[in-house]
Amino acid sequence: MPAVFEWPTVPPRPPVASAFWRAARLHCPACGGGPVFLSWLRIGPACPSCGLNFTRGERGYWLGAYFVNLMAVEAIFAVMLGLALTPPPVATPTNIGQAARPPPATWARAPPPATMSSSWMLM
């Protein structure tokens, strides 16, 4: 009798929110068992609870993930550094008092200042 090939059993996929919560706690995304990390930067070959294989059969598989993560962090750092090194706005003669001046729509309703009315009456 020939041997019948059977596919290895794979645990069913959890909901996306559940998988992200498990990953945030550094547990297996499939079953929630853990821990799956051997050290701070080293992941184990498989989940100790369900046996889900974390290794891929090729060298440098995680290189793309490392590169994208490095570029994202460097971009965030560059933006934060640029904001920290940008000098604050300086008051120039053209923008002094603009924040305290009322909008133009209220100018017609406001009474004229005393110096303006007295100079107008003298003319």
Image (spheres, rainbow, N blue to C red):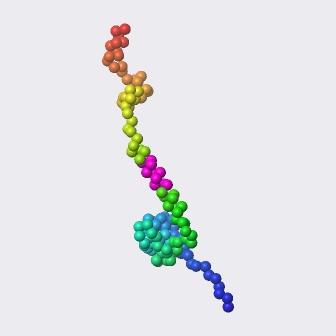
Q: What residue is at 42 percent from the left and 48 percent from the top? A: 80
Q: What residue is at 35 percent from the left and 10 percent from the top? A: 121
Picture coordinates of residue 13 (x, y %)?
54, 70
Picture coordinates of residue 83 (x, y %)?
41, 44
**SS majority, magenta:** helix
Question: Is 12 positioned to the left or the right of 37 in the image?
Answer: right
Query: Height in image: 38 above or below 111?
Result: below
Question: Is 115 positioned to the left or the right of 103 in the image?
Answer: left
Of residues 120 and 41, the one drawn nearer to the viewer in this rendering: 41
Q: Name the image quarter holding the N terminus.
A: bottom right
Q: What residue is at 40 percent from the left and 41 percent from the top? A: 86
Instruction: Give the total of numbered labels.
Output: 0
Bounds of the magenta segment: 71-80
Q: For residue 32, say whether it is visible.
A: no
Residue that extends furthest to the bottom in the rendered view of this protein: 1
Residue that extends furthest to the right in the rendered view of this protein: 1
Q: Does the magenta stretch include residue 23?
A: no
Picture coordinates of residue 72 (x, y %)?
48, 54
Query: Height in image: 123 above or below 51?
Result: above
Q: Name the image quarter holding the C terminus.
A: top left
Q: Does the magenta stretch include residue 76?
A: yes
Residue that extends furthest to the top in the rendered view of this protein: 123
Picture coordinates of residue 11 (x, y %)?
53, 75
Query: Height in image: 7 above or below 70?
Result: below
Q: What residue is at 45 percent from the left and 49 percent from the top? A: 78
Q: For residue 16, say whether it is visible.
A: yes
Residue that extends furthest to the front in the rendered view of this protein: 59
